[in-house]
Amino acid sequence: MPTHPDPLYLDHAATTPVRPEVVEAMAACMTGVFGNPSSGHDWGRQARRRLEEARATVASALGVTPSSVCFTRGGTEADNLAILGLARRARRQGARPHVVTTAIEHPAVDEAAQQAAREGARHTVVGFVEGALDLDALGRVLARRPAVVSCMWVNNETGLALPMDEIAAACREWDVPLHSDAVQAVGKIPVSLTRTPVDMLTVTGHKIYGPKGTGALIVRGGRGRPGIEPLHFGGGQERGLRPGTEDVAGAVGFAAAVRLAVAEAAAESVRLTEIRDAVESGLRASVPGLRVNGDGLPRAPHILSLAIPGADSDTLLAALDASGIAASGGSACASGSSAPSASLSALYPGDTATSLRLSFGRLNAAGQVDRIVAAVAGAVARTRELVAS
Amino acid sequence: MSAGAPGRRILVAMSGGVDSSVAAAMLVEAGHEVVGATMKTFCYSDEEVAQSTKTCCGLDGIQDARAVADRLGIRHYVFDVEREFTRDVIDDFVSEYSRGRTPNPCVRCNSNTKFRDLLRRGRVLGCDGVASGHYVRIDRSGGEARLLRGLDGNKDQSYFLWGLPADMLDLLHFPLGELTKPQVRDRARALGLVTADKPESQEICFVPTGNYRDFLARKLLPVHPALSPGAIVDHRGRVLGRHDGYSGFTVGQRRGLGGGLPEPYYVLEIRPDAREVVVGPRHLLDVDGVVVGDLNWLTTRPEPGARLQVQIRYRSPLVPCRIESYGENSVRLAFDGKASAVTPGQSSVFFDGERVLGGGRIRRVTTSSRPSRRTRGSAPAAPPSESRARPPAPRRTGRPAALRG
């Protein structure tokens, strides 16, 4: 547990605490049901029933059929499965695979695409123009009929929300499979595949108060499933897409988390927007030279990404930690790395200001705003003195 | 004592090695609030580094340091100092080699990068001191803080710390200064630290393979004189053969020569302008004195005529000497006897017994006409890293075959 007497968690985009309802559902499953869902006896049937209930819950929350839900061991695995699975299929069919991503993807997508390229695929990265995805460029690349386009729904570093309706419409027009990593979108903004015809969707449990190591790749039925090749072999579980004895309790916890996140998304979004806006305006008033990344662009409500010229990122985060505040630089995954963030470079080419990400969630309340503003402003001022000295 | 009165907040440099791990643990035991910091000094995506089996400072080092910090229940941060490290340490390393000298990058890092940076960041975090796992001691019993050799003569690292700003000493803590390496390992095992049996890192952190010539080749233009062929000449000016770049040579290094010569030959001098490497018999390495530049004093500067002892290489014995005169940021020392293989670029560290008085970089040697036949161990071919347990074996570089012909 944190050692600070009054810790403040502003890193919900990195991960979230498991909520009590999820713990309860998982505990009930783990204590009452241990069977292997593939078994033909009663123990197996009970486990299978829980698993399929979980699948139906996830499907209903996201507006897809249960058979579209492939449980995975988290978001990274789902991203890899979608991209490598389609690239390898195209290759097996004799074509040179072509993988299209955007300039702001999470490494789980970007590096999977790079792996596809090492295996012979062409990899095209669609850039940004003044903060917006270059839809003209996307249109041109779609005309070449790539094997897959992957475009995240909400960017993990900046909170930028991408125009998924337009992107999906463009992909549909060219009949190109579209994958979207939506781990930062579900529960924060409306995500329904009924409304937005994305073919594959990555969801993970631990960003929405579910257990770590759980998630799903949603693979929409109809219109011919894209025919993803599995990354793992041995057993036919998850329709062969993700073999291995299922984590039933994990699936149950994941499903409870998805159901609650989607059900509460509208109200939670309003609440988080208020907190974020209050922190944002407080910091604008107290931190000279501050820039809000994604300012004026559509943003998810839980992420506040700040560009702070003249401060050192590592020291700023350490200073915040010393005052009991958990935040991160670009993203938790890039900790200890000085490489300029690809996401921020895409939005602000050539910019080298330190970035600070505050991400809000269930551990935050409006009453914390003043303390957050004072602590961040104070830490920035101390860190700037260091750089100036 | 070495850890100071309890109840301070101290930032400890944790490389992920056993020494700094135990240093952190001892400070915790002494009742301090300890914060761990690992400095990321260079690019770990470098292929060579990624594939090497380096044991310190790399990504593994960060993971190990974090694991130890978690075990000790202390906070731990990674600070990216790549830009500063490249500017202050790596660029100097390359520049020195390209001028035919043999640098001590660990000295540069300790003097310019590591401790300064940690103190500054520590201040932001409310720390009032900085600690490391170096085997040296700080004596605070008198009015001023004094830097002393580590008690373990095999591990003493004072040679690498002469460049610390004098006013910084009082803020530093070296908990290992009174321990031996085996004692440190025992403590690490008793504490169950993952780093307890980690092998010693032997190489300079940014050249983990030890092949510093390849490293230079990547940093310099391939046509740089330091990497271009030149003549190997003897002390009388006779051409003995060719070499493929003087950066592969260090003064004092024994050359692998074939037959035809009456005795082993050693590198006596590197002449960058002519791209010549001068070799000769061992007794010609013996010199009477040295001119040391880039001085730093940890105490009041001694007057000319003062006697002190100087260490001219890591782990070489102290040489009694006298201060002859001062030049512009330089000092001329006269050895009581002779010293062998005094290598331009290497650190020269001044002692009064076990106390470090200061030091500098060797600019050139001074010698009388009468050669001596006394011999001492040969100098390292590669610059020593501060964690080296033993001096490196002389390494053959270049193409010996070219010499035989």
Image (cartoon, grey):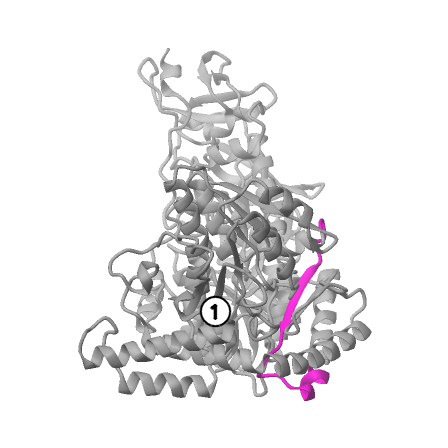
The quadrant holding residue A344 is bottom right
Amino acid type at mark 1: Val
The residue lying toward the viewer, choosing from A378 and B138, is A378
Question: With B179 as the anchor, is A4 left or right in this view?
Answer: right
Question: Which residue has dot 1 on it?
Answer: A64
- SS at circle 1: loop
- In the rendered image, is residue B27 in sight? no
Give the residue furthest to the left.
A41
- The image quadrant that residue A311 belongs to is bottom right
Residue A236 percent across, percent down from the top left? 27, 61
Q: Chain of mark 1?
A: A
Answer whether residue A302 is magenta in the image: no
Q: Position of residue B44 (x, y in %)?
A: 49, 49
Mark 1 surroundings within 10 Å by alpha-carbon count, few (fewer than 14), some (14 through 19), many (20 or more): some
Q: Nearer the viewer, residue B209 or B352?
A: B209
Q: Is B379 in front, or is B332?
A: B379
- In magenta, the rendered stretch is A349-372
